[in-house]
């Protein structure tokens, strides 16, 4: 594995092809049945070579193992070894809280700060070593702490360069910044006058405090034909409303970093529902006593790479540098995500809407026909795949939107992983396919319609993916509510292992999985488990 010779920071995994007899040289499309794939032949010499090249074998010396970890931890979703079924290696028991405004979602909020897993636990900000579960450091917190950026594993990128914590009573809030080593800045008292002028404070990316509020008078509001029932069912469109003023200030000094106006866009009344949070930043107050139609309602998901606003007329995203990005579809229909290359992608709601590719500074690089996505796990250049209603099949694009190839692949897919020369896609119906990154040709097909117990399952869907540089680990769920972990070899297309999540996590089967520092962790509200 080495740097992409074409430049950039993406790692390219140089993989060694497996047993040549496992591939159909004539068609390039071997089919690996589920039962047959369970019986993998012991190829000791080949395994030894792969261990040296990939750095995943246990026979490696400490230097090479450390080198592999150094590289794999830089890959989104990178884990040291996925060649054998996972087991619990350590356990840390304690509260893993959401902290602050995100608590009402009922989801665990964590951050990857350097090579540490960081979260609010009771009255402190705590950091765990992913290799051992040891507590690396802790920082005491005051009343009503709100720390971030954080995210829910599997739904958001949780990587951040620092954690900002706001704490204290409403009129006595103060802020501090915590770095990867646990060192905290001197707390700065937040002036209540700034809250009245700029809006309530939230922790932001790059050591900032974010403030936001609606601007202008109520005369700007035109409810159009929007109506809401007492139970919160809303129909119609809110034609116009008040813009949002978003401001970032340095958390340590209080100086303004940037400010941006997010213009109101005509919005479905469903996005103007006070049940989504009628208070500032989407804070839930007492929706029972509020008018269900709330044209000022807005909230945000704040990550280390993007500030995603949502709410009435406010479906837009802002970069950590204050550049406003509008989605590819109408408000509420599509979202913007950060790319492994540092840029951004605005995907349309479906194959009827083109997607937009942005650079890291918010410049439009190009458009991609149809609904475009990047892989959950990127161990390559950052290929984009799209589905276009006018051209059947799957279409590949460079990270800047330049077309690469078209493949006549039937069906619809989820883009699981880009690992070395293989793009791993999961088709509806439980079939995983490996496509050549350079050409789009199918390299292999793996049928995983049967579950870990060998019985036929309901349709399986991809929820998360991880990689060790050769294997792709897929977290799958089906319509019956079952969850499984499936590991496959991305070179040969062979199944490595397939087990129910309950076999690995037991009673913690509802845990969220996250890769931090090259280790796979399972996180619940009641603790963290290290897997390996």
Image (spheres, rainbow, N blue to C red):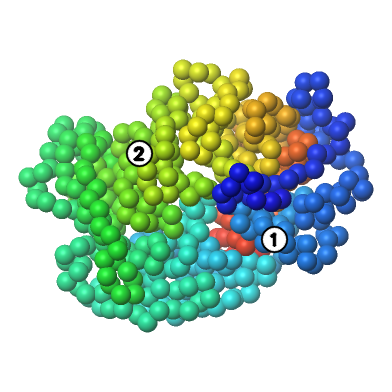
The tag earlier along the polypeptide, 1 or 2, is: 1
Q: What residue appears at the point 80 percent right and 39 percent down from the top-left corner? A: 17
Q: Which mark is residue 88?
A: none
Left of 316 or right of it: where is 522? right
Left of 375 or right of it: where is 474? right
Q: Could you say whether the residue bearing mark 1 is in a helix, strand or loop?
A: helix
Residue 97 position in % (x across, y down) = 47, 66
Q: Do the residues labelled 1 and 2 touch (CB within 8 Å)?
A: no
Q: Which of 177 and 456 is in front in this view?
A: 177
Q: What residue appears at the point 78 percent right and 30 percent down from the top-left corner? A: 32
Q: Can residue 516 be seen?
A: yes
Residue 390 position in % (x across, y down) = 46, 17
Measured in 3D between alpha carbons, the distance from the residue under mark 1 to the one under mark 2, in whole angstroms, is 36 Å
Query: Compared with residue 337, is residue 432 higher up or lower down, i.e. above or below?
Result: above
Label 1: few (<14), some or many (≥20) within 10 Å? many
The quadrant of the picture occupied by the C terminus is bottom right
Please identify the quarter of the rendering in which residue 304 is found. Answer: bottom left
Residue reaching furthest to the front: 6
Q: What residue appears at the point 7 percent right and 45 percent down from the top-left corner? A: 219
Q: Nearer the viewer, residue 208 or 362?
A: 362
Q: Provide the residue designation for mark 1.
A: 69
Label 2: few (<14), some or many (≥20) within 10 Å? many
Question: How many marks on residues?
Answer: 2
Q: Provide the residue designation for mark 2.
A: 327
Residue 223 position in % (x across, y down) = 14, 38
Q: Can residue 411 be seen?
A: no
Q: Could you say whether the residue bearing mark 2 is in a helix, strand or loop?
A: loop
Residue 121 position in % (x across, y down) = 48, 72
Query: Compared with residue 393, is residue 302 higher up or lower down, i.e. above or below?
Result: below
């Amino acid at each position: 594995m080495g740097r992409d010779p074409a430049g950039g920071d993406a790692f390219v995994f140089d993989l060694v092809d497996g047993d040549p007899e496992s591939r159909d040289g004539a068609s390039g499309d071997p089919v690996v049945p589920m039962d047959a794939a369970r019986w993998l032949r012991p190829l000791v010499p080949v395994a030894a070579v792969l261990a040296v090249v990939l750095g995943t074998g246990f026979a490696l010396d400490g230097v090479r193992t450390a080198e592999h970890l150094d590289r794999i931890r830089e890959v989104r979703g990178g884990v040291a070894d996925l060649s054998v079924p996972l087991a619990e290696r350590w356990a840390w028991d304690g509260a893993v809280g959401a902290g602050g405004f995100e608590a009402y979602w009922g989801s665990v909020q964590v951050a990857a700060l350097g090579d540490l897993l960081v979260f609010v636990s009771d009255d402190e900000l705590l950091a765990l070593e992913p290799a051992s579960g040891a507590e690396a450091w802790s920082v005491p917190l005051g009343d009503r702490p709100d720390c971030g950026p954080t995210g829910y594993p599997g739904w958001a990128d949780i990587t951040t360069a620092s954690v900002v914590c706001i704490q204290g009573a409403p009129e006595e809030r103060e802020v501090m910044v915590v770095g990867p080593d646990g060192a905290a800045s001197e707390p700065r008292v937040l002036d209540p006058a700034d809250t009245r002028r700029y809006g309530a404070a939230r922790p932001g990316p790059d050591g900032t405090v974010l403030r936001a509020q609606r601007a202008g008078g109520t005369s700007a509001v035109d409810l159009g034909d929007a109506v809401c029932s007492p139970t919160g069912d809303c129909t119609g469109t809110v034609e116009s409303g008040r813009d949002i003023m978003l401001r970032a200030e340095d958390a340590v000094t209080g100086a303004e970093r940037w400010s941006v106006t997010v213009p109101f866009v005509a919005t479905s009344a469903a996005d103007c529902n006070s049940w989504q949070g009628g208070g500032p930043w989407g804070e839930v107050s007492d929706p029972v006593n509020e008018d269900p139609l709330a044209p000022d309602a807005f909230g945000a998901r704040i990550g280390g790479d993007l500030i995603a606003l949502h709410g009435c007329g406010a479906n837009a995203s802002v970069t950590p540098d204050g550049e406003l990005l509008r989605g590819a579809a109408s408000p509420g229909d599509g979202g913007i995500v950060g790319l492994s290359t540092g840029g951004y992608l605005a995907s349309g709601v479906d194959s009827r809407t083109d997607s937009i590719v942005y650079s890291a500074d918010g410049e439009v690089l190009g458009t991609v026909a149809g609904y475009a996505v990047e892989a959950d796990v990127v161990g390559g250049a950052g290929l984009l795949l799209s589905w276009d209603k006018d051209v059947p099949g799957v279409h590949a694009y460079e990270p800047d939107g330049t077309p690469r190839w078209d493949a006549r692949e039937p069906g619809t897919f989820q883009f699981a992983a880009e690992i070395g020369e293989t793009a791993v896609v999961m088709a509806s119906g439980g079939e995983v396919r490996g496509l050549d990154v350079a050409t789009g040709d199918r390299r292999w097909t793996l049928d995983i319609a049967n579950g870990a117990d060998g019985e036929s399952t309901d349709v399986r869907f991809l929820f998360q993916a991880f990689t060790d540089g050769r294997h792709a680990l897929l977290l799958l769920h089906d319509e019956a509510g079952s969850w499984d972990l499936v590991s496959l070899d991305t070179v040969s297309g062979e199944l490595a292992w397939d087990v129910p999540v309950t076999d690995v996590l037991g009673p913690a089967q509802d845990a969220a999985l996250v890769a931090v520092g090259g280790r796979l962790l399972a996180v619940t509200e009641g603790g963290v488990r290290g897997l390996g």
